[in-house]
Amino acid sequence: ETIAINYMGNRLVIEALMPMMRKGTPGVAGSGGRILNMGSRSGLFDHLDEGEIKQTLRQPPDMSAIDTIIQQYINEVKQTDDPKWAGIDKLQHWNIVSRTYKVSKAAQGAMTRVLNTMFIASHGIPVAQVCPGMVDTDGLADGMTQNPESVAMFKASGMKVKTVEEGASTMVWLALVRYEEEPFGGYNYAEGVKISYENGQVLQ
């Protein structure tokens, strides 16, 4: 479900809305509409284990490569994670859930870069990703309630919980800014600045 929502769901919505989007001059970034995906710092490549998944998502040649590696991951999880949690302790199950979220968001970031190249070339439509951070939503509250370990980790990190308005600010800015002033196509953003897909460091 995590991958279906964060990766495939995102992709299917883009495909469904693309025919209705304003088309621009092929090859001229920003001349058409714009697509902004909701990312997460959890999808940074530094958070993934070394291996084929990380290597593929770091430099995906096309959407087919992303689909293939994600299906491989799904097959791997199906072999290790019992739906009824039989034979697997709570920590092992939480590790799988946490890893799957990271993989799904890394796949979304890879998709953002591939689609940016494709859509600028075909319609002048740039694609970027925004990481809003921890936002005060019902989903966050439910997650913290179900996973007490996450509360301790969150408090130790010193991260601030943002209001909905604060979390949406970068997304709104990129939706409205003139592309010539902020050529955002293919980039990852957080707190109003470009950040690395690798480790979240601010890019100049």
Image: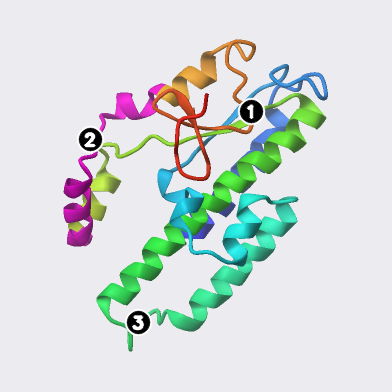
Tag of residue 185:
1
Q: Earlier in the sequence, mark 3 or mark 1?
A: 3
Tag of residue 160:
2
Q: Earlier in the sequence, mark 1 or mark 2?
A: 2
Amino acid at the residue labelled 2: Lys
Amino acid at the residue labelled 3: Lys
Residue 165 lies in the magenta-colored region: yes
| Label 1 Cα neighbours within 10 Å, binned few <14 / some 14-19 / many ≥20 | many
Residue 89 lies in the magenta-colored region: no
Where's residue 59, x and y in %?
67, 50
Between 142 and 181, the one lying in front of the other is: 181
**Element assignment for label 2:** loop
Amino acid at the residue labelled 1: Gly
Where's residue 107, x and y in %?
57, 52
Residue at coordinates 80% horizontally, 30% vertically from top-left? 121
**Element assignment for label 1:** loop
Where's residue 118, x and y in %?
76, 37
